[in-house]
Image (tube, rainbow, N blue to C red):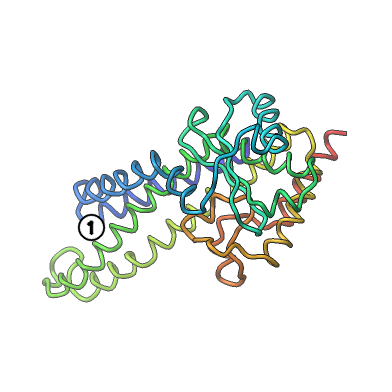
Amino acid sequence: MNNIIKTTFLLSLLTILLVFMGGAVGGQGGMMIAFLIAAAMNFGSYWFSDKIVLRMYNAREVTREIHPSFYGIIESLAGRAGLPMPKVYIIPDDSPNAFATGRNPHHAAVAATEGILRLLTPDELEGVMAHELAHVKNRDILISTIAATFAGAISMIGTMLQWGAMFGAGRGDDEDGGGIGGMVGSLALAIIAPIAAMLIQMAVSRSREYQADASGAEICGRPLALAGALRKLHNASQAIPMLDARPATAHMFIVNPLTGGGMRTLFSTHPPMEERIVRLQSLASRAH
């Protein structure tokens, strides 16, 4: 419940930031134009992103006949979660990872790399795929699309403000927001607001990861198996990075496929691995 409240709060912050930015650049008209453009772009990604990302990673669909053990795990977990059977894919990559995609539970797909199938025990693999099905059940793809729509609109308004500040620098000082002070203020807002929106969007993603860990542990019934899998995946993904990993899709994977620390950690879509493991261990201790 805390994660749900946090997600609602963060999405509200994005809404407030969008309204503020819209008023700064051109009132409600400017806000609506940027919002509609961002919404149109994200509407397309919402409906077609599953096909795009699966093709991007050369994922191949498997059936019970092709891979009975992996397919059977997904089928069993989907039944426990009360979900329709999703499509099942395997990605030809040695880096261990997995993700879920699809616009709703009736149009969902789960994918795992060949590396994760080799690395994890059956119980650990079950925990990972339960996490991915939790994303489907919690409709996290819809939530992330909403967050991306707002963040995209704010970024567009920021660009509009930058151009407006440059070409509006010659307005008289008596005009509201005119002159050098207005130009500097507009440029500052144009830089700071999109960064703030991106940080809020990252925070939404992190919150949904915590929620998927908790829901996944409930679905599979073994929080420690998921915790052990996360530790293995964290270490192995650093040793064997995903060659085709891209920032635009990094948030989809159970562990961040992009390696690196420092500022990249600040803008990471994933919460700290140790914190995820501690939370799962706490769930396990409360269950006994």
Q: Is residue 28 left or right of residue 108?
A: left
The picture places residue 230, in percent across and down from the top left corner, at 73, 52
Q: Is residue 100 left or right of residue 161?
A: right
The picture places residue 166, in percent across and down from the top left corner, at 20, 73
The picture places residue 149, in percent across and down from the top left corner, at 37, 47
Q: Which residue in the protein does label 1 denote?
A: 25
Q: Is residue 212 left or right of residue 142?
A: right
The secondary structure type at the circle numbered 1 is helix
| Of residues 89 and 223, the one drawn nearer to the viewer in this rendering | 89
- Quadrant, the N terminus: top right
What amino acid type should be assigned to the residue bearing mark 1?
Val
| Of residues 217 and 162, the one drawn nearer to the viewer in this rendering | 217
Say above or below: 195 vs 28: below
| Of residues 244 and 43, the one drawn nearer to the viewer in this rendering | 244
Residue at the image position 24 percent from the left and 62 percent from the top: 160
Q: Is residue 72 left or right of residue 187?
A: right
Residue at the image position 55 percent from the left and 56 percent from the top: 269
- Quadrant, the C terminus: top right
Say above or below: 285 vs 30: above
Q: Quadrant of residue 240?
A: bottom right
* Residue 282 visible within the image: no
